[in-house]
Image (cartoon, grey):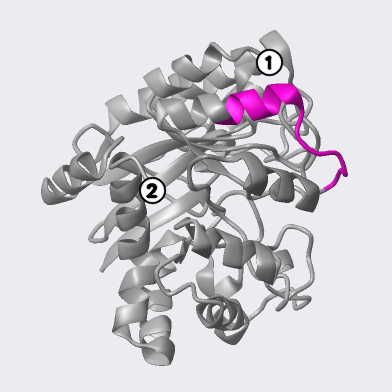
Amino acid sequence: MFLFDLHCDTVGRLHDSICFKPGESVFLTKGERLPETDTLLHNHGHLALDRMAGIDWCQCFAIFMPDQYRGPDAIAYFESCYRYFQTQLAQNAGRLAQVQTVGQLKSALSEGKAAAMLTVEGGSALGGDLSRVGRLAECGVRIVTLTWNGENELASGNATTHGFSGFGREAVAEFERAGIVADVSHLNDRGFEELAGFARRPFIATHSDARSVHNHPRNLTDDQFRHIVSIGGLVGLNFCVHFLSDDPDPAFPRLAAHLERFLRLGGEDVVALGSDFDGCDVPSWLGSGEKFPDLYREVCGGFGQGIADKLFFTNAADFFARWEGGM
């Protein structure tokens, strides 16, 4: 089984457990503290390298940008997370390799390593400075989720109502020139409509479900999904229980309903996985990364192996191959 997961918050959660006091991080509730021994290799969260052994796996690791950080504070936070990510890569060099291209991804897998693709969740990582796009590219960032739930210098998230700023429009153009993919997960509906009007290259939604299946503002409307299909984009199914249904512990049929809806909307070559592991509550049967094979078997049984292979790996890998070709 080959796996390409478009979003997790593991790096941010581990970083904040070291650098912040309990209650100061969105990942850690008041009084909570992760064991100091937790690392990418072994931890008590959803994803750990030692528990993913045997899976041919590419993981998009997000540097999550809290909404309260702006300017120099945002830049400092990004750089701190990036240093932590690089430390973890160095400590696990025999198991994990950072990749920026599909060729590098395939080489890592052929060497028995997991592939790590760096992403950013929140355009505030730019600190309001367009020249920072070059720094993100230099760090190997391949995707930028334009907003989180609130408003930043670029645009507004799903908890707000404003659209793109002039700076945000310029930032998207710079991302496109730098080969960084824009991600609309968390962007509000007005922002999506505006981006659809001015983007020159395809954009994606790394971790979003179908709003027509479960009415949540973080999910995509049918028209939004159809637009992503029309531009050759990509959409990662999110495992968050709040986006799947009102059930606090939804079973596979609820996730399958979102997949089925996307397939009916023409998304066979667009739908992928965006677990949101370590950033949300997930169903108990999908409680950690080693459950991916269970999900694969469920999808094979309900939709066939061809769809399962596209969902789990092929669609995401093909998107990045096309992106590298300049689409």
Please say if 185 is above or below 147.
below
Horizontal side, residue 259 vs residue 88: left or right: right
In the figure, is residue 162 to the left or right of 94?
right
What type is the residue that disc 1 sits on?
Gly
Residue that protrudes farthest toward the left in the picture: 111
Residue at mark 2 = 59
Judge whether residue 299 can be spotted in this image: yes
Image quarter of residue 289: bottom left
Residue carrying label 1: 128
Dot 2 falls on a residue whose secondary structure is strand
State the residue at coordinates (45%, 33%).
180
Lateral position of residue 168 relative to residue 262, left or right: right
Question: Which mark's residue is nearer the viewer, 2 or 1?
Answer: 1
Measured in 3D between alpha carbons, the distance from the residue under mark 2 to the one under mark 1, in whole angstroms, is 28 Å
Above or below residue 232? Residue 24 is: above
The spot of residue 23 in percent (x, y) is 78, 33
Q: Report the span colored magenta.
A: 159-172
Q: Give the position of the C terminus as an image quadrant.
A: top left
**Whole-percent x, y for residue 29 in the image:** 76, 42
Numbered marks: total: 2
